[in-house]
């Protein structure tokens, strides 16, 4: 018997459960009768030991790895929930695989893993704009076979997780852009952009503030999120299927208004062209600005009386709209998906199903302040009592949640759009010129990747 054939026999015994006693007898006869095989004695008995071990050692639990945020309160509540899951499901053990907290770094790491067809991590925490990209690349599994109750979730979040009619991720929590306004400087939030300009200027003058309005104007994804809200508020959109329509009349009006808020109205500081979320938050919480566009995370931070000058003196509302448009809240948040190369897809789904269940969403909302992706839980009375930002106020904004374009090449499209939006806001291009250039380049991306439809361009 050769070393290879002995190994096959051992593995066969492990696989089929054949008794090791006949094999022991056979090996003993062979090793005593055939002198050339005596040198294999130790190898034979090692194989027998392995065989016996295969039969006598019970199989352990299935190990599922989950990659995503593991820092701070977010990480703490997730660890508690996973511990509870493992008590309820002793046949599954979940291991957390830490990733960078910065979205771009996490995205890069995921792409490296999934391009290499790595089987782990099994469960991936995705940004809402990544789902179609990962689905089109074949990196994540469609979830329809698990028959999730999709009707219980926020429709905009479900739409963002579909690609070509199939569901690829489940919403974990939702995030939306919203308007923060000073309750001590104005009786109510402005409902139109014209009213916004008026109250921002008046509040700035009467309150002795440096600025009227703050938003994120640096050249990054946050600028696209802000522009999408101005665009939707004017009745426009970025894509219409495979056609780029960002340069429509509505698009030009939206971008023109943003620029006028800086240079003509003077309510947005020029410094905002370098601002991200935190610079805008600091300006608002330091009492320097009357209104601010930002995400829900800022609410609890600004209610801290130890570091905020506006604690107890602000509220949130949907972004305004112009005639012909609707209030628009750019959708953010996290989703959970299954690695297409996972060897434990069924177990991975059980983890996702548990983490996106109502109880876990409510616990996460109370502990971290992240809003449930389930509609019923957004109205839960226990959540209302425990969250700093009243869910009723948040729900008034979340009802206007709008996904950014659901396309696998969104990141590339956004990169093009960021350049031309920023050029328009800094005066390097006129709004119409900037959006025409962006539309042409974006359409070329769609057509190069087989996702475009000829005859692009919004009518003006």
Image (cartoon, rainbow, N blue to C red):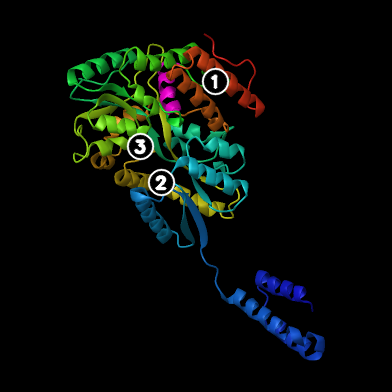
Q: What element carries label 3?
A: helix
Predominant SS of the magenta segment: helix
Which quadrant does the N terminus fall into? bottom right
Q: Which residue has dot 3 on it?
A: 376
233 is within the stretch colored magenta? yes
Magenta stretch in the rendered image: 223-235
- Decide: few, some or many residues near mark 1? Use Cα within 10 Å; few <14, some 14-19, many ≥20: many
Residue ID at (43%, 59%): 86
**Extreme-bottom residue of the structure:** 32
Q: What element carries label 1?
A: helix
Check the image and report above or below for 264 versus 293.
above
Q: Which of marks 2 and 1 is nearer the N terminus?
A: 2
Q: Which residue has dot 2 on it?
A: 357
Q: Distance between the residues labelled 3 and 2?
A: 12 Å
Q: Could you tell me residue 19's position as x and y percent?
A: 67, 79
Q: How far apart are marks 2 and 1 (CA)?
A: 41 Å
Residue 90 falls left or right of residue 58:
left
Q: Earlier in the sequence, mark 3 or mark 2?
A: 2
Residue ID at (26%, 42%): 382
On the image, which quarter does residue 157 sit in? top left
On the image, which quarter does residue 258 sit in? top left
Q: Could you tell me residue 29's position as x and y percent?
A: 77, 88
- Decide: few, some or many residues near mark 3? Use Cα within 10 Å; few <14, some 14-19, many ≥20: few
41 is within the stretch colored magenta? no
Residue ID at (56%, 48%): 339
Q: Could you tell me residue 119's position as x and y percent?
A: 59, 53
Residue 162 falls left or right of residue 363:
right
Q: Which residue has dot 1 on it?
A: 438
Check the image and report above or below for 7 versus 126.
below
């Amino acid at each position: 018997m050769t070393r290879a054939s002995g190994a096959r026999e051992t593995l066969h015994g492990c696989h089929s459960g054949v008794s090791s006693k006949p094999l022991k007898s056979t090996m003993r006869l062979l090793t005593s009768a055939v002198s050339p095989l005596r040198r294999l004695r130790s190898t034979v008995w090692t194989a027998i030991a392995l065989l016996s071990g295969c039969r006598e050692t019970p199989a352990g639990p299935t190990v599922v790895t989950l990659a995503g945020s593991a820092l701070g309160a977010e990480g703490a509540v997730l660890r508690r929930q996973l511990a509870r899951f493992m008590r309820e499901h002793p046949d599954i053990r979940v291991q957390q695989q830490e990733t960078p907290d910065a979205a771009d770094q996490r995205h890069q790491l995921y792409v490296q893993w999934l391009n290499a067809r790595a089987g782990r991590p099994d469960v991936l925490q995705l940004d809402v704009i990544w789902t179609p990209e990962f689905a089109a690349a074949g990196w994540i599994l469609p979830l329809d076979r698990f028959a999730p109750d999709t009707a219980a979730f926020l429709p905009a979040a479900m739409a963002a997780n579909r690609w070509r009619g199939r569901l690829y991720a489940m919403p974990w929590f939702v995030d939306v852009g919203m308007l923060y306004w000073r309750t001590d400087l104005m009786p109510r939030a402005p409902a139109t952009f014209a009213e916004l300009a008026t109250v921002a200027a008046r509040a700035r003058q009467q309150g002795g503030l440096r600025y009227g309005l703050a938003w994120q104007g640096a050249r990054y994804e946050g600028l696209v999120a802000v522009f999408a809200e101005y665009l939707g508020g004017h009745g426009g959109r970025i894509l219409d299927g495979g056609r780029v329509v960002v340069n429509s009349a509505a698009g030009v009006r939206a971008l023109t208004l943003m620029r006028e808020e800086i240079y003509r109205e003077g309510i947005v500081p020029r410094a905002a062209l370098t601002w991200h979320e935190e610079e805008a938050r600091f300006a608002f919480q330091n009492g320097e600005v009357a209104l601010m566009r930002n995400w829900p995370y800022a609410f609890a931070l600004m209610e801290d009386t130890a570091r905020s000058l506006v604690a107890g003196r602000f509220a949130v509302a949907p972004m305004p709209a112009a005639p012909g448009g609707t209030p628009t809240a750019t959708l953010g948040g996290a989703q959970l998906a299954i690695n297409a190369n996972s060897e434990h897809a069924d177990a991975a789904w059980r983890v996702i199903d548990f983490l996106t269940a109502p109880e876990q969403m409510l616990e996460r909302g109370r502990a971290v302040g992240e809003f449930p992706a389930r509609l019923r839980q957004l109205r839960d009375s226990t959540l209302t009592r425990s969250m700093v930002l009243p869910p009723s106020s948040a729900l008034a904004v979340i009802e206007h949640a709008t996904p950014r374009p659901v396309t696998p090449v969104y990141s590339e499209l956004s990169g093009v759009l960021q350049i031309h939006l920023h050029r328009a806001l800094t005066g390097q291009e006129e709004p119409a010129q900037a959006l025409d250039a962006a539309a042409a380049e974006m359409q070329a991306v769609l057509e190069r990747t087989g996702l475009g439809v000829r005859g692009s361009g919004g009518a003006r």
